[in-house]
Image (cartoon, helix red, strand yellow):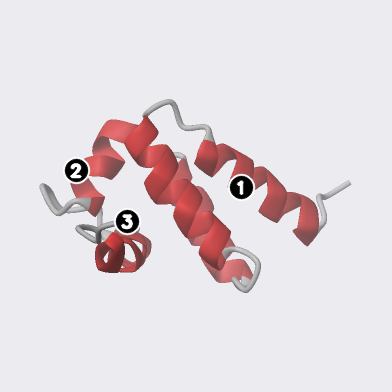
Amino acid sequence: MSETREIRVKRLRLRAWHRGIKEMDLILGGWADRNLEAADDATLDAFEAVMAESDHDLYQWISGQSDAPAELAPMVERIGADMRPTVGRGA
């Protein structure tokens, strides 16, 4: 039995918010909250592939400190671009 779209989105959101490194929780969890509901299946697949990577690597890629592998680069760039407008804003 395959999971429904609703369950998949909930599972991905939970995984995004419980990474183990707070910075990645905020980056991935925030992206998931803002984007997963409207995401198509290809985006969910790409996000799930990114989520399979280590936090250390993801942080390096999203922050631009190193290049993401070619197959993950479009999703990593999308996450990074979504995050950048909020960086440096005061409360």
Q: Earlier in the sequence, mark 2 or mark 1?
A: 1
Viewer-nearest of labels 2 and 3? 3
- What's the amino acid at mark 2? Gln
- The residue labelled by disc 3 is 91
Along the line of sight, the residue nearer the viewer: 29 or 75: 29
| Mark 2 in CB contact with mark 3 (< 8 angstroms) | no
Give the label, 1 or 3, closer to the camera: 3
Secondary element under disc 2, as helix, strand or loop, is: helix
- Judged left or right of residue 57, residue 20 is right
Circle 1 SS class: helix
Question: Which residue is depicted at the point 52% across and 43% down?
Answer: 16
Q: Is residue 54 visible?
A: no
Residue type at mark 3 is Ala
Is residue 7 visible in this depiction of the protein? yes
Q: Earlier in the sequence, mark 2 or mark 3?
A: 2
Report crowding for label 2: few under 14, some 14 to 19, many 20 or more residues within 10 A (C-alpha): few
Identify whether 51 is placed above or below 82: above
Disc 1 residue type (three-letter) = Leu
